[in-house]
Image (tube, rainbow, N blue to C red):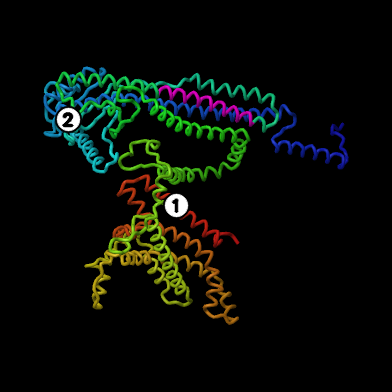
Amino acid sequence: MSTTAPQRSGGESAAPASSERGATDALHHAGTPPGGAQGNAPRRMRVLVGLSLALGLSLVLAQGLLAKALETVATERADRQAFVSLRALEDLVQRAGGKGDSVRAVVSAWQQQLPAGSAVRVIAFSGIQLEASTFSEDKDDRAAPRRLSREEKPLYDRGQRLRAAVETNREEGTARKLEVEAEALPNGGRLLSAPVTVDGSVVGMVELATPPLKAPLVPSKGALAMWLLLPLALCAAVSFVVRKQGLLVIASVVALVAGVGGYASYSMGMLDAQVRETQTLVAGQLRAMSERAQAVMAEQQLAAEPALQPGNWDADQFRRPLGLVTPAGAVNEAAVAARVAELRSGASRALGGLGALALAVLLFIGMGGLARTVETVVEHRTAYAYIAPAMVGMVVLVFFPFFYGITLSFTDSNLYNTGQSITDIWVGLRNYVEILGDFSIAKRAQDGSIVFNYLNFYYTLFFTVVWTVTNVTIGVTVGLVLALILNVQGLALRPVYRVLLILPWAMPNYITALIWKGMFHQQFGVVNHVIRMFGGQGLAWYDTPVSSFLTVLATNGWLSFPFMMVVSLGALTSIPTELYEAARVDGASRWQQFTAITLPALKPALVPAIILSVVWTFNQFNVIFLVTEGEPSNSTEILVTQAYKYAFQRYRYGYAAAYSTVIFGILLLYSVVQNRVSRATEAA
């Protein structure tokens, strides 16, 4: 007995089944499964997961930033209190003459008011002597006064660095080098070193070692949990009432803003309280040190003139008063308010960035972006596995240095502040304004002649453009002519010519550059020898901007034509000979054949090659740096060599980074415009 269900006619069965499958597929692709409650559950779960991850990520990072900020405040508090003690001791040592029994008596008296675990010592440069010390290792046969031993040379070197910093800042009238050094000790304390100045001369150094720093205040985990769970609970409750996905996403965004904003308010309040507490403690330390200094001066009968200036003791590492505490030892409320506002501004920017990151994570997950991405990666996992190593290499070797360089361009980074954080040396657009806003290209001298400012950006840009245009023109012209010659049918020894003409490109260009530099030597160069053979006088090729430019033009022309020759020759061999035969039948001349057939056929190959050649020549570092070295007087510098010298000869790293970013922008703009205009790289 058959159990097969009775079949309907084709018209009755196919249509309903097809329409049912279509409705199901449509609902599936729209992300709305049939059944309101069942369709809302995946969306609700997706939004809640996105909110959880976004809130958790942002709040954990915010807590880490807050903990780091509190640690910085605690370190600054300890350093400033120690600075006050150090500067007060420095003042007393200076009044005692910087050496002798008076200095040892001052150090002994001063040690009594320092916290347990602290130690001080005084180094005199005259005689390379340890004048006084309360360090544990300076006892018995090593007790002061004595000459520094060989292994104590770092102490003397540190003192000489401080003396050089004081003299440099004094000569330049700026605060460029640190005049107080601070470093961490193995036991968790700090070692502070400051110069001792007597009658305007740096005669020694005073050092203060502090006990281990107190543990900084730790952000509350309860606050973190509250601002994480409360918005999540509210959003979960709303998700059971709201059915539309758009309203659900809006509710999750509101919850995210509430959570991040609430924790930001908690962070700001905590940071504000710690900063104000720091000022109170430093003010108390200043009053105590002022009273103690007055007592020591009376005990040791030190000179009372000039009067003590306790307001200068609370200073930065350039020995510039901070102004947060008055000379009388009271908190300067106006200065503290400005400091707090500055800290709040920086914290707001950081928390705003975290909020933007959290919002992106929420929308990416809540709107289904993560699910679609996972599906795509799983589906094409083999392809992603192949490109993953290349992408990792690009991120590490290209993208990270690129974006770090751009970040560095907004700072005043130089040789003397490399140890400071980016926020401490941030100057915004100042480097770009200094580079692009200086239009003093030339000025008229007293004798009426025009003197060019060869370090001006626009002069260097003009020279770089002239250098690029002339070199590319020579390279393209010579390369194309040689390619046309080598493409002549029946040319004898053509393979030999090809090998010989490609040798300049095959050799390392720095070797070629050094060879050409020697050829233009005024006394021994072969170029001047040839000139003298014909009765002329040898030239000093590197003494004038024009002749110096000709040397690098000849060198780079020799290096650049083989590339264009190879590109042109490859394109010429791909042109069908039938086109030329047809043109000759029609009576076209050789020039007409060249303009109507050869050049249009060469364009798709030549234009990208010219763009590449422009970029290469624009950044042709080796030839300029090795042949002329920018002489005379930086007149033959191009932008890239100028950026190099700003970084590694003038040590202005931030300025050089801004210079390099401007170069990148110029080349990017040129490439985009050239591609748009020529359309040579677009498919037909």
The residue lying at 33 percent from left, 50 percent from top is 646
Residue 215 against residue 409 in the figure, above or below: above
- Given residues 126 and 418, the one toward you in this image is 126
Q: Earlier in the sequence, mark 1 or mark 2?
A: 2
- Membership of 268 in magenta stretch: yes
Q: Characterize the local packing of mark 1: few (<14), some (14-19) or many (20 or more) Cα atoms within 10 angstroms.
A: few
As measured in the structure, the alpha-carbon distance from the residue carrying label 1 to the one carrying label 2 is 51 Å
The residue lying at 40 percent from left, 23 percent from top is 276
Could you tell me residue 195's position as x and y percent?
A: 21, 32
Q: Secondary structure at mark 1?
A: helix
Residue 65 visible somewhere in the drawing? yes
- Given residues 618 and 276, the one toward you in this image is 276
Q: Secondary structure at mark 2?
A: strand
Mark sitting on residue 158? none
Residue behind mark 2: 123
State the image quarter where residue 555 is shown: bottom left
Could you tell me residue 649's position as x and y percent?
A: 30, 49
Mark sitting on residue 664? 1
Q: Magenta region: which residues?
A: 249-274
Could you tell whether 532 is left or right of 55 in the image?
left
Could you tell me residue 271's position as x and y percent?
A: 43, 25
- Given residues 370 and 145, the one toward you in this image is 145
